[in-house]
Amino acid sequence: MTLLPVRARYNVVIKCYLIYAKEEGILLINEQDRLWVNGVISKITDKLDWVSEKSRHKIPYTTVDGTHDDRSKENPSGDDADGICWWTNGFWGGMMWLMHHETGQEKYKEIAAYSEEQLDRCFEQFYGLHHDVGFMWLPTSVASYKVTGNPESRKRALLAANLLAGRFNLAGGFIRAWNDLKEGDTRGWAIIDCMLNIPLLYWASEETGDPRFKQIAMKHADTSMDAFVRPDGSVHHIVEFDPFAGGVVKTYGGQGYAEGSSWTRGQTWALYGFMMSYIHTGKQEYLDTAKRVAHYFIANIPADGVIPVDFRQPAVPKLEDDTAAAIAACGLIEIAKAVGEHEKDLYVNAALKLLKTLDHSRSDWTKNRDGILQNGTGAYHSATHHFEIIYGDYYFIEAIFKLKGNDLYLW
Ligand code: GLY
């Protein structure tokens, strides 16, 4: 065996440590912040311990009088898309996998498995499904397969990936978002949220060795960089392409305030989504785009750290969306881990500000309510605002575990 000179050996050790630190998600934060993270983790584990038992046989989206609803049973509008095929139905299972990873407790694995099995009805119903199959099967089946190697989970995840790939429009180079809506023809519609669905395609290529899934994901990401991201780093929610000839037809404000505005959750789907595309592909433009969106986002965080529904909404009413803060924090932490020491503080400090605001003033840690974050908002023009939404809690927990260095990497 040839021994390297001492300095070279030292460099190898340092390099290995840095690679280990990146792969294991260890982000060095100061002692005071580390103590705060540990405190939040103990509040999360206390709360999820009893909430998981109470909601063991549910798939919650929100709460009614503080108690989780159940999308696996109720079908509020008579439409499959609002019932078992509701796009958020993967987050409860995902939360259970995060908790299993953190605590090692079997009960979380059992609840996640139950939730994943319920989703099989969606494959049978089919019509309620659209591009959000990534949100549904990444945190459930892909997570299960990664943790347990269950071949049934692998099959479900590949089926979902094939459904997503089948929505690709070759003329426009985009993945079609929704199915026909009552209000109009959506054949040419793509939405920025899809940036968090396409990791399912990256996973499918990584798992099978078949490059088609990744090629579709990257084409969609490239189209999104061109068509959704504005020069100032803000993003459109919806872009309509000509589904026959390609090319942008029109943009829409979607769930934000208006056309040309800046729906905050949409900004975060872009921020975290481009970052995940960079992690899966190494393509530098995706990291540059994630950073550009992040810089715009950070510049717009209000002094009190409370994220509005839209950065360009009127000052009154002061509508908030705490889910956007949680998703942004996840993306910012991933950017911090990818950039050098000299750059990371900008992103870590912004993430800490968002998460501390959520912990200190927007969370319920009591036994009175099943949800943690209290001020989620689906869309600016919805009839109701400021309620518990399952993906707010999911991404808040994911972000806190990322800070600890114990993320499960579900995207
Ligand atoms: N993906 C839809 C939303 O963020 O509300």
Image (cartoon, grey):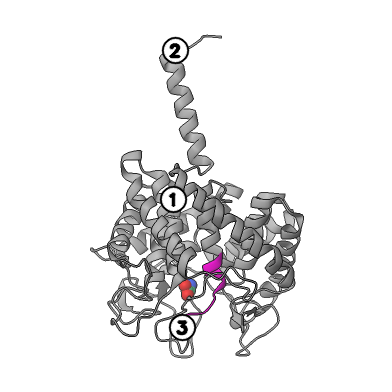
Q: Is residue 89 visible?
A: yes
Task: Tell me the CA gap for discs 2 and 1.
Answer: 33 Å
User: Ligand 1 within 8 A of label 3's CB?
Assistant: no
**Residue ID for mark 3:** 385
Magenta residue check for 328: no
Indicate the position of residue 381 as horizontal and vertical percent values: 40, 86
Magenta residue check for 389: yes
Q: Tell me the element at label 1.
A: helix
**Residue ID for mark 1:** 334
Nearer-N-terminus badge (3/1): 1
The residue at 36%/58% (across/down) is 222
**Residue ID for mark 2:** 6
Nearer-N-terminus badge (2/1): 2
What span is in magenta?
386-393
The residue at 41%/15% (across/down) is 7
Indicate the position of residue 218 as horizontal and vertical percent values: 42, 56
Q: Tell me the element at label 3.
A: loop
Nearer-N-terminus badge (3/2): 2
Image quadrant holding the N terminus, namely: top right
Please name whichever residue, 30 or 77, is drawn nearer the observer in this view of the structure: 30
Q: Is residue 365 left or right of residue 235?
A: right
Task: Tell me the CA gap for discs 3 and 2.
Answer: 61 Å
Q: Which amino acid type is shown beneath numbered disc 2?
A: Val
Indicate the position of residue 26 as horizontal and vertical percent values: 50, 42
Q: Nearer the viewer, mark 3 or mark 2?
A: 3
Indicate the position of residue 119 as horizontal and vertical percent values: 68, 71
